[in-house]
Image (spheres, rainbow, N blue to C red):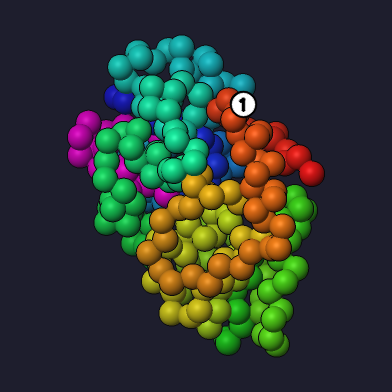
């Protein structure tokens, strides 16, 4: 049985889920490694895909587990060891790079995604009728500060209120507006069919042209900050020496 190791980020799992479904057609039953803190959400994402076995694993356990797997049974995506398919940071997004690593057309990100059907099996979080959906992450410094360009009634995602990310699917699809930072929630919205206006607050988290230009199928209003390009140039210097660490949150953008 082959084992898929992706970056560990929940948003990456949502994006790569379509490819994982395609891989089950190519190889049959396989294991998908995930961090224990995301296990509930990952199990829900693949709940309709019986060929995917979820493997919760801590970063400390990775070397031991990898050492027990034959190299030909390892599928490494956007993670250390995936250097046989180096990314082009200036011309390619991380999302399209992940699909290129497994030789699957990026259209399968949506065509084969199990997320929308899987969300129907998950208890949905009640959402105030007529309230906009808002998600940021102020605890990590990723705050939405500029979204109130006009009066809007909103409900902010509260940490710990849902066991599974898919529990917000109905709220995202029915909200009159969706305001998110670049996080797992933008990828969740892309996997669904929201009826309201979509706003991606890109200024709230670092962005650079190329690597973070992920293809989006829905119409988003993208909100940037004024010094985005100067920060992007600083990030380019950092990325020129980047190595693919398991925990990319360790990186800090130079001021």
Q: Residue 104, located in which quarter of the rendered image? A: top left
Which residue occupies 20% across, 35% down?
A: 26
* Magenta span: 15-32
Question: Is residue 123 in view?
Answer: no
Position of residue 110 measured from the top left corner of the image (x, y, whole percent): 32, 57
Q: Verify whether residue 86 appears in magenta.
A: no
192 displayed left or right of 36: left
Which residue occupies 33% across, 37% down?
A: 100
Question: Is residue 75 in view?
Answer: yes
Which residue occupies 43% across, 12% down?
A: 68
Position of residue 130 measured from the top left corner of the image (x, y, whole percent): 58, 87
What crowding class fits label 1: few (fewer than 14 Cα within 10 Å), some (14-19), or many (20 or more)?
A: few
* Total tally of numbered discs in the picture: 1
Position of residue 60 measured from the top left corner of the image (x, y, whole percent): 61, 22
Quadrant where the image shows the N terminus:
top left
Which residue occupies 61% across, 60% down?
A: 202
Q: Which residue is mark 1?
A: 241
Say if 99 sits above or below 72 in the image.
below
Q: Nearer the viewer, residue 125 or 79?
A: 79
Quadrant where the image shows the C terminus:
top right
Q: Residue 87, located in which quarter of the rendered image? A: top left
Say if 154 sits above or below 99 in the image.
below
| Secondary structure of the residue carrying numbered label 1 | loop
Say if 51 sits above or below 227 in the image.
above
Q: Nearer the viewer, residue 7 or 217?
A: 217
Say if 18 sits above or below 88 in the image.
below
141 displayed left or right of 40: right
Magenta segment, principal secondary structure? Answer: helix
């Amino acid at each position: 049985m082959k084992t898929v190791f992706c970056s560990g980020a929940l948003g990456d799992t949502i994006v790569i889920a379509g490819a994982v479904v395609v891989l089950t057609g190519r190889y049959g039953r396989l294991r998908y490694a995930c961090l224990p803190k995301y296990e509930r959400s990952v199990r829900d994402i693949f709940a309709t895909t019986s060929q995917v076995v979820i493997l919760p694993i801590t970063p400390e356990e990775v070397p031991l587990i990898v050492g027990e797997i034959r190299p030909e049974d390892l599928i490494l995506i956007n993670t250390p060891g995936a250097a046989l398919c180096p990314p082009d940071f200036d011309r390619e997004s991380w999302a399209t790079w992940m699909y290129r690593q497994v030789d699957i057309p990026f259209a399968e990100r949506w065509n084969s995604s199990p997320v929308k059907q899987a969300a129907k099996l998950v208890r949905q979080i009640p959402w105030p009728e007529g309230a906009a959906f808002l998600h940021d992450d102020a605890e990590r410094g990723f705050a939405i500060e500029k979204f109130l360009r006009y009066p809007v009634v909103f409900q902010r995602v509260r940490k710990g209120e849902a066991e599974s990310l898919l529990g917000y699917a109905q709220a995202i699809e029915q909200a009159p507006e969706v305001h998110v930072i670049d996080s797992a929630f933008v990828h969740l919205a892309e996997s669904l069919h929201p009826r309201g206006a979509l706003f991606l607050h890109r200024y709230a988290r670092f962005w650079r042209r190329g690597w973070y230009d992920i293809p989006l199928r829905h119409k988003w209003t993208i909100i940037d900050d004024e010094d985005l390009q100067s920060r992007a140039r600083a990030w380019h210097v950092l990325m020129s020496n980047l190595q693919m660490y398991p925990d990319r949150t360790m990186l800090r953008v130079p001021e």
